[in-house]
Amino acid sequence: MARYRDSVCRLCRRESTKLFLKGDRCVTDKCAVERRNYAPGQHGVQTRRKFSEYGMQLREKQKAKRIYGVLEKQFRGYFKKAEMKKGVTGENLLQLLEYRLDNVVYRLGFTLSRGMARQLVRHSHFTVNGKKVNIPSYSVKRGDVIEVTKRGKDIEAIKESLKKTVKKEPLSWLEIDEEKMRGVVTSVPMVEDISLPIQEQLIVELYSK
């Protein structure tokens, strides 16, 4: 499957905001946005230009795609599903993205970034309701139990991540048992729980043209 392989710091610089794609690095002085807050590339300008209405909508879509690590075709598929569901399309879209297994693994604190979560899911280090799942885009649902496998519990990266995230305020739609390395999806994520720099309504307006 195609995926982005270049430096993810370039993506943050392109959007002129922290997308938290590299875990701890994003909160240090090494963060690319802190050091060079202008567009990447040979012709990147160090002064931000104003965007048109379409440009603003496009940037919001790109930002959401990059945060969740999905490409255009897959993202459009999520949008079509969101349109068919009852409720507000923009909120539905974010909920579908939040329900991705790699995102839930990250939200539970098993990893410091969604990229790391994607890699560990690919290597079959997590189970859903007792069954190994190695598909990052797998959609969880309310009541699902996500647990680190016996082999995965020996991975230092997971242990260190839990130590760093255990003090953070837990999300209302997830429950985490740090000792057993197990989490439960208790409800549907609300927009206020997601707390990402995304204006989902602009994405809806873009795809509605």
Image (cartoon, rainbow, N blue to C red):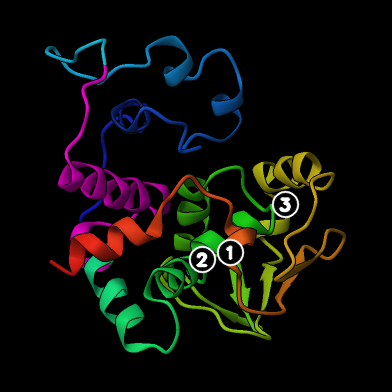
- Asked if disc 1 and disc 2 are in contact, CB closer than 8 Å, the reply is yes
Q: Which residue is mark 2?
A: 98
Using a 10 Å C-alpha cutoff, classify the residue at mark 2 as few (fewer than 14 neighbours), some (14 to 19) or many (20 or more): many
Dot 1 or dot 3, earlier in sequence: 1
Question: In front here: 162 or 154?
Answer: 162
- Asked if disc 1 and disc 3 are in contact, CB closer than 8 Å, the reply is no
Spatial CA distance of label 1 from label 3 is 20 Å
Dot 1 or dot 2, earlier in sequence: 2
Provide the secondary structure element on which disc 2 rests: helix
Q: Residue at x 26, y 33 (%)?
A: 6
Left or right of 149? Residue 77 is left
Dividing the picture into quadrants, the one containing residue 25 is top right
Using a 10 Å C-alpha cutoff, classify the residue at mark 3 as few (fewer than 14 neighbours), some (14 to 19) or many (20 or more): few
Q: Which residue is mark 1?
A: 104
State the image coordinates of residue 159 (x, y, percent, origin top left). 75, 46
Using a 10 Å C-alpha cutoff, classify the residue at mark 1 as few (fewer than 14 neighbours), some (14 to 19) or many (20 or more): many
Amino acid, disc 1: Val
Spatial CA distance of label 3 from label 2 is 26 Å
Q: Nearer the viewer, mark 1 or mark 3?
A: 1
Q: Which residues are magenta?
A: 48-74
State the image coordinates of residue 127 (x, y, percent, origin top left). 61, 74
